[in-house]
Amino acid sequence: MTELQQSILDQRTLQYGAHRDLTPGTQSLLYTLACVEAEEQTLQEYCDTNGTCYDVIGKSGDTYSRMRPEWQQLKEARMRKQAIIARLENWLGEAAPKDDEVGEYFSK
């Protein structure tokens, strides 16, 4: 585990551990979240430095832009992060309440 991952894991463990006792599964989820957040940070720094696209010269001689693989990886890391956070918030009971269409119908 890198220093960045360990730092993120320590921070998240304190945050989530303050609300409830952490189960082994939750600890594993926090470890995965730390890895994803470290990956996200590294990829974001790369994209900030190099941009999200690069130029390519096609067979016809035209220049066009292509999306960097790192940009796609960053988008995927963010989606994984959102899924993990949603799962953790559900575990804590802090997720936004789901709309109840039936309840809305009868309250009118």
Image (spheres, rainbow, N blue to C red):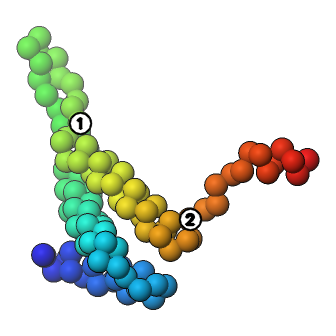
**What residue is at 17 percent from the left and 32 percent from the top?**
55
Compared to residue 108, the image places residue 1 above or below, namely: below
Disc 1 marks a residue whose amino acid type is Met
What residue is pinned by disc 1? Answer: 67
The residue nearer to you, when weighing 5 against 84, is 84
- Sequence-wise first label, 2 or 1: 1
Give the label, 2 or 1, closer to the camera. 2
**Res 8 seen here:** no
> Picture coordinates of residue 67 (x, y %)?
23, 36
**Res 88 seen here:** yes
Q: Is residue 107 left or right of residue 56?
A: right
* SS label for mark 2: loop
> Picture coordinates of residue 8 (x, y %)?
28, 77
The residue nearer to you, when weighing 96 against 38, is 96
* SS label for mark 1: strand
- Circle 2 crowding by C-alpha within 10 Å: few under 14, some 14–19, many from 20: few
**What residue is at 74 percent from the left and 45 percent from the top?**
101
> Picture coordinates of residue 9 (x, y %)?
27, 79
Q: Quadrant of residue 34?
A: bottom left
Quarter of the figure with the N terminus: bottom left
What residue is pinned by disc 2? Answer: 95
**What residue is at 46 percent from the left and 61 percent from the top?**
86
> Picture coordinates of residue 49 (x, y %)?
21, 56
Give residue 47's mark. Answer: none
Disc 2 marks a residue whose amino acid type is Ala
Q: Is residue 82 left or right of residue 105?
A: left
Contact? badges 2 and 1 (CB < 8 Å)? no
**What residue is at 42 percent from the left and 80 percent from the top?**
16
